[in-house]
Image (cartoon, grey):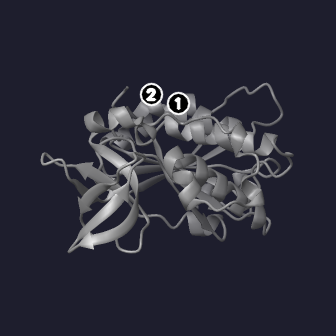
Amino acid sequence: MVLSYKPRLKRIIVIPSTLFIKDNEPIKTFKVGQLARWCSIFRVERIIIYQLDEEYRNGIFLKNILEYIETPQYLRKYLFPKKKIFRNVGVLPPLRTLSHSKIHEFKKIKYRDGLVLNKVGRNKYLVYVGEEEPVVVVGKPGRKKRVVIKITSSGMGRIIDRHKVPYYWGYTVSMVENIFEALKLEHSVLKIGTSRLGDDIRKIYRKILRIIQNKRYNAIAFYFGSYDKGLLEIIGDRDPKNFFDIFVNLVPFQATKTVRTEEAVPIALSIFNVLIS
């Protein structure tokens, strides 16, 4: 078991709602699972899906499958009702992240996702964590059913914010109306647009390193185009410098006509995993 800590720079990917729309099932679900694997391997903490070409339904499909696979197996049947959208989840690969750890590893990690069952006292709740017997925890879950708990020295659990877990603890998924909404992130987020029309990564990687090292930013967001539209076309052929802090070509001398979104994601994450680690 590897205790993988969160990176100093939070990693975000921004993808179009049309991703995998041309694929048939069960290949489509499988590909979403592969995307989730890439995100987990490179410690992505947030996935933003922007609607493209008014494609809402496929975006919801992506969001549901990404959230399903990110949820620990022992909680899935309680949090996801039986729907047609989940009919092929059997092809999804396991993530094997710390939040999906085996029950015997729980005591070493001291953190675990659980399901709030009922209240048993003032700020005390029974939480199901995959064992036969639920854990008594203290805290305020609010309206959330799924919570993160930390086992204290007394053997009881305490509800904590997932952002306070020191280890990489999976990702969250959200959906916005268009790419311009996805660009409205905090000033502390470094926005990187990926495009074959961008600056050659070999020529600007030192500049990127300098930007990262000044510690002005606490997160980095990677923006990707679709299978038939690059980012420039999506933003209306306007100057990308008005939208992105860095506009970069991560695959100089590509030998294929296009680089698919699902290919560009691991390429970007792997390159920057080296640059910013």
Q: Secondary structure at mark 2?
A: helix
Q: Residues within 10 Å of mark 1 (few under 14, many from 20)?
A: few
Q: Amino acid at mark 2?
A: Val
Q: Secondary structure at mark 1?
A: helix
Residue 271 numbered tag: 1
Q: Amino acid at mark 1?
A: Ile
Marks 1 and 2: CB-CB under 8 Å? yes
Q: Is residue 116 above or below residue 113?
A: below
The residue lying at 76 percent from left, 46 percent from top is 88
The residue lying at 72 percent from left, 53 percent from top is 86
- The image quadrant where one finds the C terminus is top left
Q: For residue 258, what is the image quadrant?
A: top right
Residue 274 numbered tag: 2
Q: Is residue 255 left or right of residue 138?
A: right
Whole-percent x, y for residue 63 in the image = 64, 58
- The image quadrant where one finds the N terminus is top left
Whole-percent x, y for residue 231 in the image = 70, 53
Give the camera-side residue of 112 and 12.
112
Q: Residues within 10 Å of mark 2 (few under 14, many from 20)?
A: few
